Image (cartoon, helix red, strand yellow):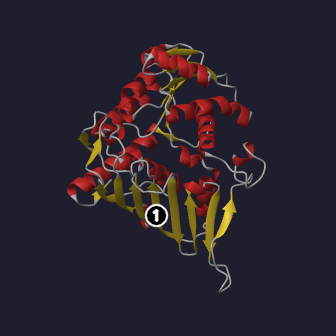
Amino acid sequence: MSSLGVGLIGTGYMGKCHALAWNAVASVFGDVARPRLVHLAEADAGLAAQRAAALGFARATGDWRALVADPEVDVVSVTTPNSFHPDMAIAVLEAGKHLWCEKPMAPSLADAERMLAAARASGRVAVLGYNYIQNPLIRHMGKLLAEGVLGTVHSVRIEMDEDFMADPEAPFSWKSEAGSGFGALDDFGVHPLSLLAMLFGLPEAVMADLAKPFATRQTADGGRREVETWDIANILLRLPEGVSGTILLSRSAWGRKGRIAVQVFGSRGSLVYDQERMNELALFTREGRPGEEGFRTILAAPAHPPYDRFVAAPGHGLGFNDLKVIEARELIAAIAGQAAHVIDFEQGFAIERAVHAMARSHREGRWVTL
């Protein structure tokens, strides 16, 4: 496949991650043509020019629609706040370009449905930025489960915690606006759901309780503004094949910086993974002698592809941005018509439906069946 022309809309934290991934993917994998960094869009032309120079893009614009119309752009990364996703994603797809859009799809289910319809009509590849499914150890976890190492799985728990909103004096931001979505439920909850989609399948029924630890936050003018989203979410799940599930989410958990803890329990053993120690997987099986039982640590290694494309031995480890590089390689495979390990808009919409079912469960105080 010939080299892809890349456009990038938004250059915040995730925008930079996408730019680094596009820059690195050919060097790391060696089996794809080097993407051309063609066009970058930001909120104003001055910032766009500055970021284009820093990230290696040939052109810059303060008008994202000009980027979408650029005939040299084949694929667009959309890394803006959630509320901008629908208009941008639909415009990209209607222009006949491939799309790599950050999660979640959109604050409203109706907008997510419009995005899905645009993807179906376009015939182009449209994927969402679920990078945690790319971790080689998450893939290995799936392999162990498929091989039946744990016996019959009966329960799974996933916790996602960070502390960037734990300080009651942290300023009001767009993440506290109702227009951004539900809060931790979709900001965080979509990631555990993406892992469940890959490992077990999405829930068949949900029961959720949401909470706001702080009712207001300080504004730039020194006033206070009501927090419109929930920073804590606790969800019970009924998963396929009778598996019982739990998801616990918090954006206000002091000391937690990037925790996604996945615990799977079966009739013969357990698996435990934590994103804060993303190069380790703990496995317990009943094979140990009495008094010597315990978890053993599996270190990420070249035996867990594509770890071997980055480093040559265990103990050196991958990082968050490496997962984005893997994701870029999977997207390129999808564009080439090859099998790819991605969350496309079909699966992404199913995740959005699950999130909205959880929000409905909280509002109505009952189990909701999907």
x, y (%) of residue 236? 36, 62
Examine the image and state in which quarter residue 243 appears.
Answer: bottom left
Q: Residues within 10 Å of mark 1 (few under 14, many from 20)?
A: some
Image location (x, y in percent) of residue 49:
53, 16
Secondary element at image label 1: strand
Residue closer to the observer: 289 or 80 = 80
Q: Find disc 1 in the rendering and name its residue.
A: 157
Q: Position of residue 155 (x, y in %)?
A: 46, 68
Query: Quarter of the image containing the N terminus?
Result: top right
State how many labels appear: 1
Q: Amino acid at mark 1?
A: Arg
Q: Position of residue 193 (x, y in %)?
A: 44, 52
Taking the spot 72% from the left edge, 43% from the top edge, the residue there is 310
> Which residue is farthest left?
364
Left-right relation of 174 to 98: left
**Viewer can see residue 337:** no
